[in-house]
Amino acid sequence: MFDLDLWREIFQSINMNRTRSLLSGFTVAFAILLFTILFGIANGLQNTFAEAFVDDATNSIFINSGMTTKAHKGLQSGRRIKFKNEDFDYVKEEFGNKIEFITARIYRNTQASFRNEQNTYDLRAVHPDHQFLEKTKIKEGRYINQNDLENKTKVAIIGRLVEEDLFLKTTALGKYINLSGIQYKVVGIFTDAGGDNEERKIYMPITTAQHLYGNNDYIDQISLTYNPEMNYDQALAFGNQITKKMKDRFSVARSDQRAIRVRNMAEGTRAISKMTGVLTFFILFIGLGTLMAGIVGVSNIMIFIVKERTKEIGIRKALGASPKSIVSIILIESILITAIAGYVGLLLGVGVLELAGPSLKTYFIKDPSISNSLVIGATLALIIAGTIAGYLPAKKASRIKPIVALRND
Amino acid sequence: MLKINQLHKSYPIGDSSLHVLKGIDLEVEKGEMVAIMGSSGSGKSTLLNIIGMLDEADSGDYILDELPIKDLTEKKAAVYRNKFLGFIFQSFNLINYKNALENVALPLYYQGMKRKERQEKALFHLEKVGLADWAQHLPKELSGGQNQRVAIARALAANPKLLLADEPTGALDTKTSHEIMAFIQQLNDEGKTILMVTHEEDIASMCKRVVRLRDGVIMEDKKVEQVRAEQYV
């Protein structure tokens, strides 16, 4: 039921006491402004973290080799460990049931050219599974497939920016690209959320690279993702198990930190999610604290308003105002002031985030913003806050005895 | 019209209590104009507050127009006040941010009357007190006598059975007092029942009946020859 007269009464009262209403609104507006900005910054920090890990799957494990630093089983230190295809097959067989995707990698730099355009790019020779590990998205054409591996085909999948650099405005798909003197057919163009650097890469089948660059079966790195259903502890144990087995396989001391290096993303992911969790908690704590201060502020001012209007409320009661009508006047006034002021604060906060957002990137705050659901949530919270702030004063007002209020003083 | 029987009222003061009304019996007929007199502390204002349902008696009966007024909830008291009673106060008690018309229309608002209708009605009553031209003025822009007339218009707006006036001329000079009294007498001539608290003899003499209170009991209750206020205006 919409009571126009009631609203007229309330607006008249707010209008008559503009300064007072403005002052009480200011507290709330400021509280919401702070809350919005804090929340936006927290979101920005989380975005930065999320972006740092968006490049690779979060359940990745990378196995690298290096030089031994300790003598072990009669072998000297300073021995170089190098992975071969058989090591890749070993990992695949040994841990097959726990592995989601697995690929070997060979890294090279390559001079790439097409007609008159040329540039240097990172080259990665990989297995087909690499696409899922690196979260590579195919824009056109296809990724490396099993057929490429078996036939050592001379094909290349190039990044979006490689295409832009070398092929200018034309499409690269189906054309031949020259990589360090050998012609490769471009069969796919990819994009990657990991940023420009990731889109300036060229992929080719690992067998092709092994055949053409030295005709050996060396590989630089083995990357895999473990079964995503594994929990943190299981993932950690899995990483340790791989480390142990690989060290044994190459007769490396267990304590040797350099010869076999296993990087388990589970550790980093865990630390980050813990940190953002704590951050979110703090922001919520501070935000709710400020909001509470705002509520107390409005409540205080409403109590003052009731005191100031005691006589008026007494007159109204003598003229036949029911306690309910007195409660609604005070309560709705409180809700209205809180909601409007809060909304102004919210808009200001969003505006500040919008304006300051781009310049905050240097402080690891990316796209600070608040979600729509949070805006709706905040609006509801404001209305509830207004009700809480107005309830006690309104109750107090409804208990005013006209005889006391009208006493001549 | 109004019947009061053995009315008692006391107020707690610290540990003891102050017995203000000590068994009041009073009967008022329709169309009467009664002055309640007494020095301060005699209980005259308390009596008026109880009659006005602004306060409640400890014991005794109060029947208004055959309706027993007892154990009222706040809500019910508000409805009764609105329907049966019109108040005129010494300090006018107008709402300072509402203009004359809005002030007069307020009791009608609490009756749930539509805006247009109540403004028409309020304007009619303002006209009756001769202030139609001042309808849009705020109380601070009006003189004391004008304010009291707005208050009277407000008291009349809801067409109450009983008009209660608490020292209606207390804040006015003699000339304005007489103007207001002449107006109240005119209302009484038209048939309104009026109950008035005052401590001024000349104001009391303008009523038709004077009830004197002292220390919470009625000392004297007599009909008087009404002095018409017009002759002084």
Image (tube, coloured by chain):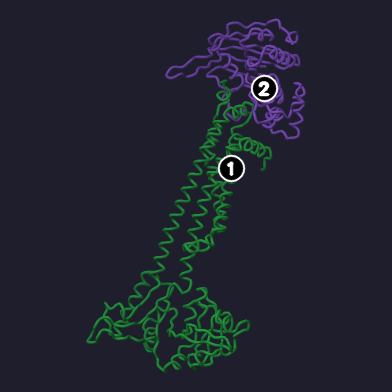
User: Which residue lies most toward the front here?
Assistant: A116
Chain letter behind tag 2: B
Q: In this rendering, does residue B160 appear at all?
A: no
Q: Which mark is residue A337?
A: 1
Q: What chain letter is assigned to the residue under label 1?
A: A
Is A179 placed above or below B43 here?
Answer: below
- Please name the color used to draw chain B: purple
Would residue A77 be found to the left or right of residue A205 on screen? left
For the view shown, which residue lies furthest in the left direction? A74
Letter of the chain shown green in the rendering: A
Task: Give x and y (percent) for residue A293.
Answer: 48, 44
Which mark identifies residue B86?
Answer: 2
Q: Could you tell me how many numbered marks the image carries? A: 2
Disc 1 residue type (three-letter) = Ile
Q: Quadrant of the N terminus of chain A?
A: top right
Q: Residue at x 30, y 77 (%)?
A: A257
**Residue shown at the point (56%, 90%) measured from the top left:** A185
**Mark 2 in CB contact with mark 1 (< 8 angstroms):** no
Mark 2 on the same chain as mark 1: no
Quarter-of-image position of residue A21: top right
B74 horizontally vs A74: left or right: right
Q: Say which element carries label 2.
A: strand
Query: Label 2 is placed on what type of residue?
Result: Gly
| Residue B44, percent from left and from top | 58, 13
Q: Name the residue rendered at 46%, 17% in the picture.
A: B17
Q: Judge the density around disc 2: few (<14), some (14-19), many (≥20) Cα neighbours within 10 Å.
A: many
Secondary structure of residue under mark 1: helix
Percent x, y of residue A134 = 48, 77
Q: Is residue B177 left or right of residue B218?
A: right
Q: Position of residue B98 (x, y in %)?
A: 67, 31
